[in-house]
Amino acid sequence: MARHDANIDIVALDLALQVVGGRWKTLILAYLHEQPLRFAALRRAIGERISEKVLAQQLRELERHGMVSRRVEDTKPPQVEYAMTEHAHTLCHAVQQLAIWGAQHRASLAARDVPCQEEQSKDELATRAANQDAP
């Protein structure tokens, strides 16, 4: 197997992974790429796999790194909307390439009859898509 020698800056890669690494941050950014979302709508879009506590923590970390902006509407109760920052939009190409790789990897696993760790039914995916469109 040929190895691609890309002279990767390991320190820079480590910093990038600190900002967007982990299970949820890239998914959060992917959902916010489409449009700003309120907290509850973002949680519905991601699904029940993430708790409110973890989502709030991940959003705070993304906000601290300048990847997400938080806007609080002066209503009763206050409504909070999250959006990707311009800086976060510079990651869109990388996230898209990661998604392409994921699809290729999923196909590779399927060709070897290896189940994906988190296979989801078509019904669950349809439900998540419908919830994302809900106000």
Image (cartoon, helix red, strand yellow):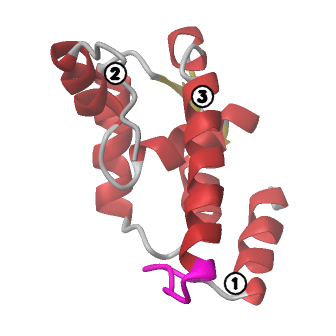
Q: Residues within 10 Å of mark 2 (few under 14, many from 20)?
A: few
Q: Tell me the mark number nearer the camera, choosing from 1 and 3.
A: 1
Residue that mark 3 sits on: 83
Q: Which callout, 1 or 3, points at the residue further toward the start of the chain?
A: 3
Give the residue type at disc 1.
Answer: Glu
Q: Which residues are magenta?
A: 110-119
Q: Element at badge 3?
A: strand
Q: Earlier in the sequence, mark 3 or mark 2?
A: 2
Question: In the displayed structure, does residue 113 sit left or right of residue 50?
Answer: right
Residue type (three-letter) at the residue carrying disc 2: Asp
Along the viewing direction, whichever of 121 and 47 lies nearer the viewer: 121
Residue 106 screen position, x and y as percent:
59, 68
Q: Residues within 10 Å of mark 1 (few under 14, many from 20)?
A: few
Based on the picture, tell me whether residue 112 belongs to the magenta stretch.
yes
- Is the stretch drawn in magenta largely helix, strand or loop? loop
At x 58% / y 69%, what residue is drawn? 108
Q: Is residue 24 left or right of residue 92?
A: left
At numbered mark 2, what does the secondary structure look like: helix, strand or loop?
loop
Is residue 3 left or right of 85 when viewed as pictured?
left
Residue 5's mark? 2
- The residue at which mark 1 appears reads as 124
Name the spot of residue 111 as percent of width and height, x first: 63, 79
